[in-house]
Image: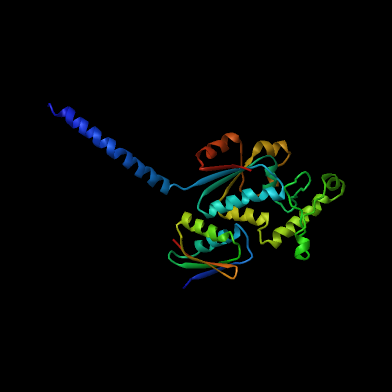
Amino acid sequence: MNFDRELDARGLNCPLPILRAKKALGEMQSGQVLRIIATDPGSVKDFAAFAKQTGNELLSSAENNKEFEFYIKRK
Amino acid sequence: MSTTPEIEALIQQKLDELLPQKLEALLAEREEAKTPSMTIIATKGTLDWGYPPFILASTAAALGWEVTVFFTFYGLNLVKKDISDLQVSPIGNPGMPMKMPFGPDWFKSINWNIPNIVQTNIPGFEALATTLMKQTIKNNGVASLAELRELCQEAGVKFVVCQMTVELFGFTHEDFIEGMDYVGAASFLPVAQKADVNLFI
């Protein structure tokens, strides 16, 4: 999937992945896509809730090798 | 004019049918458009208890909420200029696991059950526990308290401080970070009244 910006949140724990993602999205244009890689297992539900609450669209959420990958489209 | 009561009855009936639906839709619309808000009363001044208010405040701000944190009593310690000296105490705190943040996995998993009477008689026990806690925080990729506090401020979380406890504990405004509002309970409560979420920590 194409993306405009990437955020490496590996090794970071709650709530840092969400806070860093919020900051990155804030610096992006509407419609651009942010790719996030995280290792915090709690981030799967947290990013879904974050997207729902903020109106940014969670395009995909996947796990491979204990790493979690999210694509979020800026509102 | 003999039809008037019938027309009125008809209007009444239509209104009874339509009003609840309309009201429901309006309320849903208003709920949707409303910015959620939260207030937190932060009353504890130890390294461990500093985390919940700053984590919840920064996360709520990231979700787009309006957040106010009221620091009172020992919570004042969380807004002092330097918070690197905050300590954690395992004494009389049976819920706190005592695990080592270094060594092989089998060693790290041991929970050191040290009786209170021993803890209180070892000089510097709390300082040691604090050092170990800070290492554990770092090992787990958890933000430092100062970092979380900064993230709160960047995200526009409003910090208000209880003026009464500032005086009670002999502090001055110089002891605290910039951008604080010094208020009393009467200023805080109306803000809390309007908030969707109120937490006492």
Numbered label tally: 0
Q: How is the image coloured?
A: rainbow
Instruction: Find residue B147 and report its horizontal and vertical position in percent.
Output: 65, 57
Task: State whether residue B20 is above or below residue B130.
Answer: above
Pick the residue in front: B155 or B172: B155
- Residue B36 vs residue B118: left or right? left
Pick the residue in front: B139 or B185: B139
- The N terminus of chain B: image quadrant: top left
- The C terminus of chain B: image quadrant: top right
Direction left: furthest residue: B1
Q: Is residue B141 visible?
A: yes
Residue at screen point 70% across, 42% down: B74
Residue at screen point 61% across, 67% down: A10
Instruction: Find residue A8 and report its horizontal and vertical position in percent.
Output: 58, 68
Task: State whether residue A70 is above or below residue B81.
Answer: below
Instruction: Find residue B16 and report its horizontal and vertical position in percent.
Output: 28, 35
- Residue B36 vs residue B80: left or right? left
Instruction: Find residue B45 and report its horizontal and vertical position in percent.
Output: 70, 45
Quarter-of-image position of residue B164:
top right
Q: Is residue B178 visible?
A: no
Residue at screen point 60% across, 56% down: B151
